[in-house]
Image (spheres, rainbow, N blue to C red):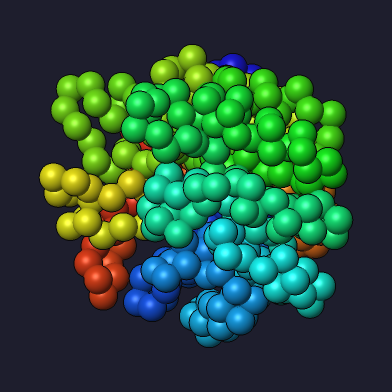
């Protein structure tokens, strides 16, 4: 099935309703504008806590969850799966309570300064060890933004250096801690995930399956492709497609859909993030079909994630059909327009 445009190409595909295991919904007007796009295709999503100020405590996550539920479109049953933002002041008992109550599914580790709104992240990893130990004890997963932030490390090397200097030592001194490497961008990270027999998985974004660094920088700079971790060489994109389409249950979808208004992106120091919530499923169908792996799409979008998070897969299904999806180039928000990620190829799958 290497040529998708044959008469034998499937015309429809029914899969369990997908979940998004890494999503930025923001707050206020932006939350209201972007949530319907995710709720239209996804049953659940792991909600990233990098608001300003960040979602650090159980009380803050409770309040944020209520705001998300209130912003759902009429009739939507979308479920936000909450996370707490790990800081050096995080109280292990607050985390344990939030987990025991069913409120949170994970804690998110940002190295300080690694990405958008990560200033309150971790600098001294010894100071968060009691939280990590408690999480290992209660089986609560840690989502990791895996990049070092040292100014002397080249931005294209930050993920690989993080694995050696931070992540591998952290996992070794915290036996039993269940880790998700978020938005992996390199073959190095994919290989590292494969090397672990247990307690390690990775999310892969929509955009890192599609763009490499040339798409951002060659022939003019394209701010809408700038995100963190920054896209790497083509060989790494190919390795990510291989991992995502392999059927290996350690890899699953986390879109990292991260909306910023056009004015925030198109300036001398523009914001990082790609807004992929509206067209992720058509893009993924295209990528998986191109890899001859349409039959593995459901695992990536709907089965591997729940299995790792120890949640049941969704009972409901969605149907993808052949045809051009109706997706705008940008959406309007009270804060300004937000450009939808352009995969650079025509989409011929849509969600029925
Ligand atoms: N990367 N933008 C954002 C977050 C992610 O590292 C991430 O998870 C954001 O805007 O919140 C981005 O490029
Ligand atoms: Zn991140
Ligand atoms: Zn993110």
- The residue that appears at 63% across and 40% down in the rendered structure is 181
Q: How many marks?
A: 0
Q: Quadrant of residue 98?
A: bottom right
Q: Residue furthest left?
A: 268
Q: What quarter of the picture does the C terminus occupy?
A: bottom right
Q: Quadrant of residue 162?
A: top right
110 or 287, which lies in front?
Answer: 110
x and y, in percent, of residue 331 in the image? 31, 62
- The residue that appears at 29% across and 70% down in the rendered structure is 333
- The residue that appears at 56% across and 78% down in the rendered structure is 60
291 or 308, which lies in front?
Answer: 308
Tell me, yes or no, if residue 11 can be seen here.
no
- The residue that appears at 17% across and 57% down in the rendered structure is 263
x and y, in percent, of residue 330 in the image? 28, 56
With 219 as the anchor, is 118 left or right in this view? right
Tell me, yes or no, if residue 233 can be seen here.
yes
x and y, in percent, of residue 344 in the image? 34, 33
With 340 as the anchor, is 158 left or right in this view? right
Q: What quarter of the picture does the N terminus occupy?
A: top right
x and y, in percent, of residue 261 in the image? 26, 60
As drawn, 173 above or below 18: above
With 317 as the anchor, is 350 left or right in this view? left
139 or 19, which lies in front?
Answer: 139
As drawn, 89 above or below 267: below
């Amino acid at each position: 099935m290497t040529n998708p445009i044959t008469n034998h190409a499937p015309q429809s595909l029914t899969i369990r309703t997908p979940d998004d295991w890494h999503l930025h919904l923001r707050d206020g007007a932006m939350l209201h504008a972007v949530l319907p796009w995710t709720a239209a295709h996804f049953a659940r999503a792991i909600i990233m806590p990098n608001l300003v100020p960040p979602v650090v405590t159980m009380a803050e996550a409770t309040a944020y969850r209520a705001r998300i539920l209130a912003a759902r479109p009429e009739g939507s049953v979308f479920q936000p799966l909450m996370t707490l933002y790990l800081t050096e002041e995080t109280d292990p008992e607050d985390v344990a309570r939030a987990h025991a109550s069913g409120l949170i599914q994970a804690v998110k580790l940002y190295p300080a300064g690694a990405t958008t709104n990560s200033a309150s992240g971790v600098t001294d990893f010894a100071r968060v060890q009691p939280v990590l130990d408690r999480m290992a004890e209660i089986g609560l997963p840690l989502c990791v933004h895996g990049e070092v932030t040292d100014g002397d490390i080249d931005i294209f090397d930050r993920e690989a250096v993080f694995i050696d200097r931070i992540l591998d030592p952290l996992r070794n001194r915290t036996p039993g801690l269940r880790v998700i490497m978020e938005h992996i961008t390199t073959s190095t990270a994919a290989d590292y995930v494969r090397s672990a027999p247990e307690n390690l998985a990775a999310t892969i974004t929509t955009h890192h399956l599609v763009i490499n660094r040339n798409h951002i920088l060659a022939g003019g700079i394209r701010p809408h492709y700038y995100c963190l971790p920054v896209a790497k060489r083509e060989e790494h994109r190919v390795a990510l497609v291989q991992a995502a389409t392999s059927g290996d249950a350690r890899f699953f979808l986390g879109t990292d859909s991260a909306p910023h208004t056009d004015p925030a992106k198109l300036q001398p120091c523009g914001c990082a993030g790609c807004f992929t919530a509206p067209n992720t499923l058509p893009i993924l169908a295209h990528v998986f079909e191109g890899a001859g792996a349409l039959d593995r799409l459901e695992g990536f979008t709907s089965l591997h994630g729940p299995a790792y998070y120890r949640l049941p897969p969704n009972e409901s299904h969605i149907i993808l059909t052949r045809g051009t999806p109706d997706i705008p180039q940008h959406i309007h928000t009270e804060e300004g327009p937000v450009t939808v990620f352009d995969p650079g190829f025509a989409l011929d799958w849509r969600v029925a």
